[in-house]
Image (spheres, rainbow, N blue to C red):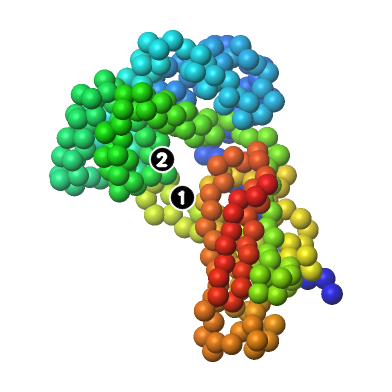
Amino acid sequence: WTPSRVRRRSPLAERPEPMSPLLEVAQISTIPSSEFIAALGGCYEKSPWVAERAHAAAPFASLAALASALREAVDGATDAERLALLRSHPDLAGKAALAGELTSESTAEQCHAGLSSLSADELARFTKLNEAYTARFGFPFILAVRNANKATIFAAFERRVTNSAAAELAEAVAQVHKIAWMRLNELVRPNPTGFLTCHVLDTARGCPAAGMRIELKRRVESSNGGGGSWAEVGSFLTNEDGRIVGGPVLKDGAMARGVYEWTFHVGDYFAAAGATFAPCGTPFLGQVPLRFGIDDAESHYHVPLLCSPFSFSTYRGS
C-alpha cells in the first residue's frame, strides 16, 4: 500500500507574484553599473556606493552570491565609510519618521513593525532610548524591524544600550546586512533551486510514521503590515518511509520567503495504531502545529517531526 496526497495542491503552492516584477539574477548580472546602482542602491540606507562597488563582482551565480558581494563591499570599506553608513539610518520612531522624511524602504519597515501607531507613552520611551543610545555610541540604534514587533524592539534596545562600543558596532553592522538582505529579496528573484521536505518518525515504535496526514499553510501578510491570513498550500500523507509522496512539497520556483506552518495529525495516526499507543479518550497530542520561517528561497529546508503520543521535537535539517 502506498499512500497518496489527500487533496491536490492549491494554486498557492506556486510562487506568489510580487506587487511589481522582480529582476532576475541573470538580468542584474549584465546591466550597466548605473542601472545596477539605480536598482539596488537603496538596499543599504542612503549608501549607493555599496551597490557601485558590488557591481564589480558581476556576474552573480545566485541571489546569495549577489548579497555576498554587497556585504563584502561594506566589510571591505573604511571605518569612516561604515560609520557614515550607520549614521545614514534613521532613529526608530524618531523625528524623521514623525515628519514623514524616511526613505520608502524605512517607512515600510517601521510601519510593518507597528511603529506608525505608537501611544504617547511608547513614543516617549522610544525617544528616551534613542537619545541614550546615540549619546553612547555616536550612531542610531539599528534593528531589522520588518519581522519584529514593539516588544522585541524594546527588549533589543534595552539590552544593546549597555553593550561595549566594539560589540555594538559589530551588532549594528550585522543588522544593516540583515536589513539589506530583506530589501534585496523585494527586488531580485531568487534562483529556483530551493525546496522544502519533511520526514516524520514515530519514536514510540521506532519506525517511520507511515500514513500520517500533514497540511501546509503559508502566512499571507497584508500590504500595510497589519493582520494577515493563512493560505493553504496543500494536504499530504506520508509514505512507508515517513516522507511525503512525490518528494519536495515546494520546488521549481514555488519556494518563497515567508512564514509557514505544518499541521501534523498525530492523534489520528496513533489512534490507528491501537489502544496501546492511544490510551487516552482525549489525545494528549491531537494536532501538532509547527510554525517555521523560510529566509533563503534558494536553499533546501528540511523540517521533520519526531513524535510519540506524548512528545514531539523538530529541527532544521538539510
In the rendered image, which quarter is residue 297 located in?
Answer: top right
Instruction: Give residue 216's position: percent from left, percent from top.
Output: 60, 60
Q: Nearer the viewer, residue 279 or 17?
A: 279
Instruction: Give residue 14's position: percent from left, percent from top.
Output: 66, 50
Q: Residue at x 63, y 64 (%)?
A: 306
Q: Nearer the viewer, residue 99 or 256?
A: 256
Q: Nearer the viewer, residue 136 or 50?
A: 136
In the rendered image, which quarter is residue 99 located in?
Answer: top left
- Residue type at mark 1 is Glu
Q: Nearer the viewer, residue 33 or 159?
A: 159
Q: Residue at x 66, y 29 (%)?
A: 62
Question: In what element is the residue under mark 1?
Answer: loop
The residue carrying pointer 1 sits among few (fewer than 14), some (14 to 19) or many (20 or more) residues within 10 Å by Cα, namely some
- Residue type at mark 2 is Arg
Q: Residue at x 15, y 39 (%)?
A: 124
- The answer to whether residue 284 is above or below residue 50 is below
- The answer to whether residue 71 is above or below residue 111 is above
Tell me, yes or no, if residue 178 can be seen here: yes
In the rendered image, which quarter is residue 274 located in?
Answer: bottom right
Q: Earlier in the sequence, mark 1 or mark 2?
A: 2
Q: Is residue 170 left or right of residue 187?
A: left
Q: Residue at x 65, y 50 (%)?
A: 317
Q: Residue furthest right?
A: 1
Tell me, yes or no, if residue 254 can be seen here: no
Can you identify the residue that label 2 sits on?
A: 146
The quadrant in which the N terminus is found is bottom right
The residue carrying pointer 2 sits among few (fewer than 14), some (14 to 19) or many (20 or more) residues within 10 Å by Cα, namely some
Can you identify the residue that label 1 sits on?
A: 221
Q: How many marks?
A: 2
Viewer-side label of 1, 2: 2
Instruction: Give residue 139's position: percent from left, percent from top.
Output: 29, 22
